[in-house]
Amino acid sequence: MKNIKDYDLEALKQEFIQIGEKPYRAEQVFKWIYVEKVTNFDEMTNLSLELREKLKQMYGMYNFNIIKKQESSDGTKKYLFDVLDENAIETVLMSYHHGYTICVSSQIGCKMGCKFCASTGIQFIRSLTSGEIVEQILAVERDNDIRISNVVFMGIGEPLDNYENVINAIKIINNQKGINIGARHISISTSGLVPKIYQLAEENIQCTLSISLHATTDEKRSSMMPVNNRYNIQELLQACKDYIEKTNRRISFEYALAKDNNDNLEDAKRLVKLLKGMICHVNLIPINKIDNGKYIKSSNENIIKFRDYLNEHGIVATIRRELGSDIDAACGQLRRKNKIENGGSVYGK
Ligand code: SAH
């Protein structure tokens, strides 16, 4: 059955015309789902009983069920959602002084194989649909009775490897007649799929682009991120320059600091050279050690030195606060530990 949440408002209007209904009915349905946050067609009381029945026959609401919820001592919550086809995904809710940020997954598993990331080694199953991306927001809002103000595509998966559905999900999330989260409050994080970065620059969406850079030489970056063998640092930064020029938007570079790997002053110097002249911001992340992972966190002293060097040389850099690390909800930690240990399917129930 079709998922009613896979449609942005315009597409839903077209769909309604196809099924012989007036487009304004689509707008009513859209508002019930994204403003009133109802979970079934019966609650859409300004539609005739007949139309409600017809919609029920044709479309599903696909509300996620919570399989598991963990709460960190800092208030971060990690959800394991049942996506209704025997698979499960993880979503994280973080609370900051300026509001709630949700970290959404874009795929079930990931193909990128970054050596420091806990999603690596998990079987790739499939990409999420737009409706499944959007439902993560709705389900977390329902569970907490809150409004989310920021969305980051930093959960499991490579968002640009699920390009169409991610862009469509952003249009739905962004729609002023629905959830209405401004594009500037939405970040897409990518390991560096260069052709898709060029494509994104043409979309006319004002969302923030985050690039997982993590190293300053091709040799080092390839050893951490196999994607660098396909698109090297120079090609990646060229695409970033094009993105900045076309969109006038500042890019955010993620740099996870691992002890004796990419955290010395030589790295900081090379980073300054690479990013010189770009409108950007560097997010330094103390790397989270994963089970059997060879990378360990840099010392606080090194992290601060690294940040100060960048700031003193004209590159704005901040250290990302680690939230949810006690519940394995921090960067790169999302996965189902128990299943991995059992050697079974990670997402299968
Ligand atoms: N595939 C996308 C988005 C998911 S990962 C990407 O690669 O950007 C979100 C962010 O967490 C990325 O910057 C990623 O490099 C980082 N990350 C992954 N594992 C990490 C770890 N163990 N410690 C710190 N950051 C990590």
Image (cartoon, grey):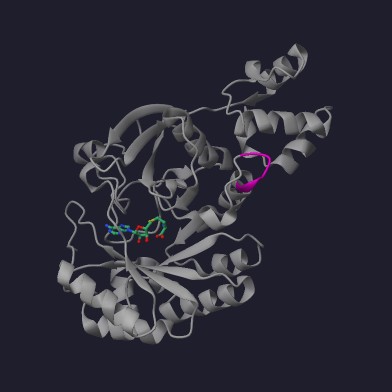
Q: Is residue 45 left or right of residue 22?
A: left
User: Residue 300 occupies which quadrant of the picture?
Assistant: bottom left
Asked if residue 79 is positioned above or below residue 263 in the image, the reply reads above
Report if residue 240 is visible in the image: yes
Query: Front-most of 27 and 234?
Result: 27
Q: Quadrant of the C terminus?
A: top left
Query: Front-most of 316 and 285?
Result: 316
Which residue shows up at 40% across the image and 51% down it?
110
User: Residue 90 occupies which quadrant of the picture?
Assistant: top left
> Residue 34: where, in percent of width, then height?
61, 34
Q: Quadrant of the N terminus?
A: top right
Q: Which range of residues does the magenta coloring cover? A: 174-178
Asked if residue 52 lies in the magenta stretch, the reply is no
> Residue 52: where, in percent of width, then height?
71, 17
Asked if residue 14 is positioned above or below residue 54 in the image, the reply reads below
Asked if residue 176 lies in the magenta stretch, the reply is yes
Which residue shows up at 59% across the image and 52% down it?
182
Which quadrant does ligand 1 occupy?
bottom left
Which residue shows up at 60% across the image and 61% down it?
206
Q: Is residue 313 left or right of residue 99?
A: left
**Magenta-highlighted stretch: main secondary structure?**
loop
Which residue shows up at 28% across the image and 39% down it?
336
Report if residue 261 is visible in the image: no
Query: Front-most of 88 and 66?
Result: 66
Asked if residue 101 is positioned above or below residue 50 in the image, the reply reads below
Q: List the single residue furthest toward the top.
A: 49
Q: Please state the total of marks drawn on the protein image.
A: 0
> Residue 101: where, in percent of width, then height?
43, 47
> Residue 104: where, in percent of width, then height?
44, 46
Q: Is residue 175 left or right of residue 270?
A: right
